[in-house]
Image (cartoon, grey):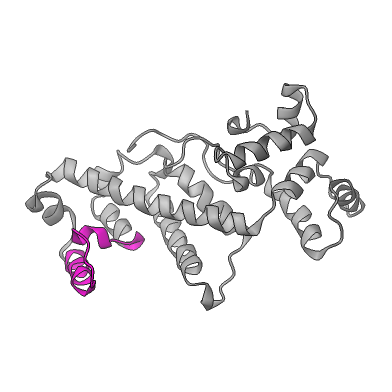
Amino acid sequence: MFRDGRSLGEISVARHTSVHVTIGSLLRLIGQGKLRRSDVFYSVPREWREPVITIIDVGVAADPQRIRTELEQNGCAVPLADVQIVCAFYDKDSAFGDMYEDIRSIECELHWLVRRILEERFGEAESGWWRQGVPEPIRVELQRRREEDPEPLAEPYFYTDLMHLWKLIEKNWAVMVERLPRSARDKPRLKADLLQLNRIRNQVMHPVRGEQIREQHFEFVRDLRIKLGFRLDLPTTEGMPNQISQAGR
């Protein structure tokens, strides 16, 4: 039910049980590795999540009923079930771990998707996909990275990063676009999404720079993974299309 996009309250009504019991069931699924804490957390709309988080972070209240009362006094009506889910599943450390998993998944799956499309179009031989699908400047850079690696990987292509992958998609757009999920076929939007993902990736991988990862960054990465068709088990949150094609899987 949760993966169908139903709210915690709707699930509880359908199961003829309390929200408290439903939360317990979700926690068990998380403990069994069948569900992620952040997926439950982001099921609450942002306009309801953020006021609750603010109250939790400043320490005004921690009890869901008290938080709801505080919100109502400030003219913000948030259903109690959604306050309860934010209180139960708000965990910055867990969100960071899930974000890392999402970034890794996007980069790895995009890496293999791009290569598979190039091989199908130009052939699997080096004279095919590698020579015809990968521009010379990128080939040279990847070869250099491999030469500089004291424990080199099997192929130069393994040294691609997100920006390389975007350049390959852009150069070969005519063959790429038909294999991308429908929600990822807007070329300017896809470029903007991958540039933003790369910025967030650098922030996550280089925390000493002091750049702050914000709430919207977590949500963006999660939704982009779904949008690209690399996670089909959940609906998106705000701002992303819900229909994810099976293309490229």
- Picture quarter containing residue 139? bottom left
Quadrant position of the C terminus in the picture: top left
Look at the image and say whether residue 245 sits in the magenta stretch: no
Q: Residue at x 46, y 63 (%)?
A: 201
**Is residue 11 left or right of 65 when viewed as pictured?**
left
User: From this viewpoint, which residue is outermost toward the bottom?
Assistant: 209
Q: Tag count in the figure? A: 0
Viewer-proximal residue among 207 and 30? 30
Quadrant position of the N terminus in the picture: top right
Residue 163, x across and y down, in percent: 34, 62
**Is residue 71 left or right of 13 when viewed as pictured?**
right
Task: Magenta stretch: give its range.
Answer: 137-163
Viewer-proximal residue among 140 and 243? 140
User: From this viewpoint, which residue is outermost toward the left?
Assistant: 127
Look at the image and say whether residue 147 sits in the magenta stretch: yes
Q: Residue at x 21, y 68 (%)?
A: 146
Q: Residue at x 42, y 40 (%)?
A: 229
Q: Is any atom of residue 48 visible in this view?
A: no
Viewer-proximal residue among 156 and 235? 156
Magenta span: predominant SS is helix
Residue 117, x across and y down, in percent: 23, 43
- Picture quarter containing residue 31? top right
Q: Is any atom of residue 101 visible in this view?
A: yes
